[in-house]
Image (cartoon, helix red, strand yellow):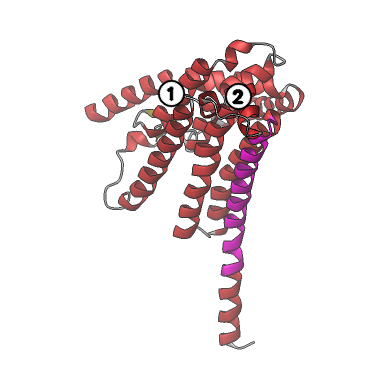
Amino acid sequence: MTKKQEYTMKKSEIKIRQVFPNAITMTALGFGVSSLNMAFWGQWKLAVLFIALSALFDFLDGGVARLLGAESKLGAQLDSLSDFVSFGVAPGFLMYQWTMDQAARHEALVGNAFRSEAVGVYWGFALFLAMCAAMRLARFNAMLEESQSKPQPPYWKHFFMGVPAPAGAGLAILPLVLWLASNEQADIFRSPWFVGFFLLFSGSMMASRIPTLCLKHLSIPEHLMTPLRIGLLFMLASLLAFSWISLSIIGICYLISIPFGIRYFLKQKALYKKG
């Protein structure tokens, strides 16, 4: 084999390798768009499931890209567009459809009437979530460009700036998950004002600069690895056996972790300035 043939083969291998992370990102986007479809038809469980699957594939694409050495600017931009749809547009539309007056929706769909409830004053909450997600993702891309010339202080290593888009989507749909966990009986979770609060809170946290915990660089002592694996297996089994209750607990725990994360960040920042 000549050197020219070897170079051509290596070049083609790199191109093929770069396809996989983008394919995973496109799969995540497909689940996000499918969640919109399920929300339109009132398939609430499937809509939530598709957002969860989109978050899973969003988590995988970055790891696969780093593992294969296939990180690219195109992949980063594609990932942001996927996140905007899956974690900005889809959750807001889902929660709006879920809380909307069903009688008004039916009348509007069959063309008999177009009542204000069908559009709803609460549509603004869904718009707010989407806009905040867009703001967060745009800022994240800008920070990637600036990170080489202006790196963040080291105490930011274990923190995100604001709530990540997948976590923000999880907080936004938490009322629906709680409602499903209650066997669709606790109507308080379906209150437009209750849902509106979560949409406003989630959007604000995504667009904010408030530090939230990041476990990417967390180091675990070796003697704790076995209990950690057992705990993860238990959590996985719980998710499969008691999906909605387990998701509710995870969402509430993440919500509670936010003030503790802020406190820990301030402590690390003060130690850095002293040292």
Residue 97, given in percent of the width and then of the height, sits at 59, 29
In the rendered image, is residue 152 in sight?
yes
Work out whether 82 lies above or below 237.
Answer: below
The amino acid type of the residue labelled 2 equals: Ala
Work out whether 215 lies above or below 176.
Answer: below
Residue shown at 70%/31% (left/top)?
Answer: 43
Disc marking residue 201: 1
Q: Residue 65 occupies which quadrant of the picture? A: bottom right
Give the CA separation, mark 2 to mark 1.
27 Å
Q: Nearer the viewer, residue 72 or 1?
A: 72
Q: Which of the two labelled residues, at mark 2 and mark 1, occupies the earlier sequence position?
A: 2
Q: Residue furthest left?
A: 274
Residue shown at 64%/31% (left/top)?
Answer: 48
Work out whether 217 lies above or below 19.
Answer: above
Residue shown at 77%/24% (left/top)?
Answer: 241
Specify few, some or many for label 1: CA neighbours under 10 Å numbering under 14, 14-19, or 20 or more: some
- Asked if the residue at tag 1 contacts the one at tag 2, i.e. Cβ–Cβ closer than 8 Å, the answer is no
Q: Residue furthest right?
A: 241
Boundaries of the magenta span: 14-43
Specify few, some or many for label 2: CA neighbours under 10 Å numbering under 14, 14-19, or 20 or more: some
Q: On the rendered structure, is 13 left or right of 267?
A: right
Image quadrant for the C terminus?
Answer: top left
In the rendered image, is residue 212 in sight?
no
Q: Residue furthest bottom?
A: 2
Q: Which residue is mark 2?
A: 104
Image quadrant for the N terminus?
Answer: bottom right
Q: Residue 19 occupies which quadrant of the picture? A: bottom right
Residue 28, given in percent of the width and then of the height, sits at 61, 46
Q: Nearer the viewer, residue 175 or 1?
A: 175
Residue 162, given in percent of the width and then of the height, sits at 39, 32
Q: Secondary structure at mark 1?
A: helix
